[in-house]
Amino acid sequence: MRPDNTAPLIAAARQRHELTRAKAIRALRELDHAGTPVTFETVARTAGVSRSWLYAQSDIRAEIERLRDATQRAPAPPVPAGQRASGASLLRRLAEASDRNRQLAEENSRLRRQLAHALGEQRATPRPGTHRTSPGDAADDSSVTITSP
């Protein structure tokens, strides 16, 4: 009968499992510390393990999902200081926008006055083929009668 050598095999499997867990946990910490998005793919690649093994480890899987969700909700990376607008430039842009708004409001008012004037002239000028029932009814369009030529 053969001797029972399963104990060393079981011990080696346990040791390999613990080393693999340690690599995966270390990879998780490194990725999180570096600010790299944490996904099953990046952890598996960094740790040198399979994604299916990561999915099978409930505690590691939960941590990957927690970190993945946290990095997906994080705001966009900050704009570098050299590319940020200064307070003075923002104030200048605001002043320019306010000036443009004022100019547009003035133009809008001027155009409304011109339109009202043009409509008034159009109503005051009799159209050919029309006649008014009385001279005082010039402003009242309801008294205008159109006749056929």
Image (cartoon, rainbow, N blue to C red):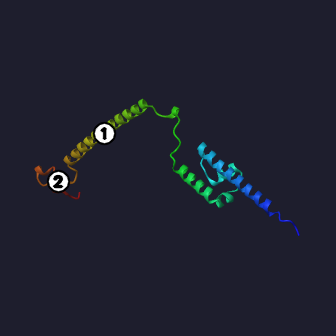
Instruction: Give residue 115's position: percent from left, percent from top.
Output: 27, 44
Q: Describe the element under mark 2 as helix, strand or loop.
A: strand
Quadrant in the picture for residue 106 = top left
Query: Is residue 90 positioned above or below 66 on the image?
Result: above
Residue at 25 percent of width and 41 percent of height? 113
Residue type highlighted by circle 2: His
Q: Categorize mark 2 by other alpha carbons within 10 Å: few (<14), some (14-19), many (20+).
A: some
Question: Quadrant where the C terminus lies?
Answer: bottom left
Question: Quadrant where the N terminus lies?
Answer: bottom right
> Viewed as shown, does residue 135 lie left or right of 129?
left
Q: Describe the element under mark 1 as helix, strand or loop.
A: helix
> Viewed as shown, does residue 6 lie left or right of 85?
right
Disc 1/disc 2 C-alpha distance (Å):
40 Å
**What residue is pinned by disc 1?**
105
Closer to the eye: label 1 or 2: 1
Residue type highlighted by circle 1: Ala
Instruction: Give residue 93's position: percent from left, percent from top.
Output: 40, 34
Viewer-nearest residue: 22 or 77 = 22
Instruction: Give residue 91's position: percent from left, percent from top.
Output: 39, 32
Quadrant in the picture for residue 6 = bottom right
Instruction: Give residue 57's position: percent from left, percent from top.
Output: 65, 59
**What residue is pinned by disc 2?**
131
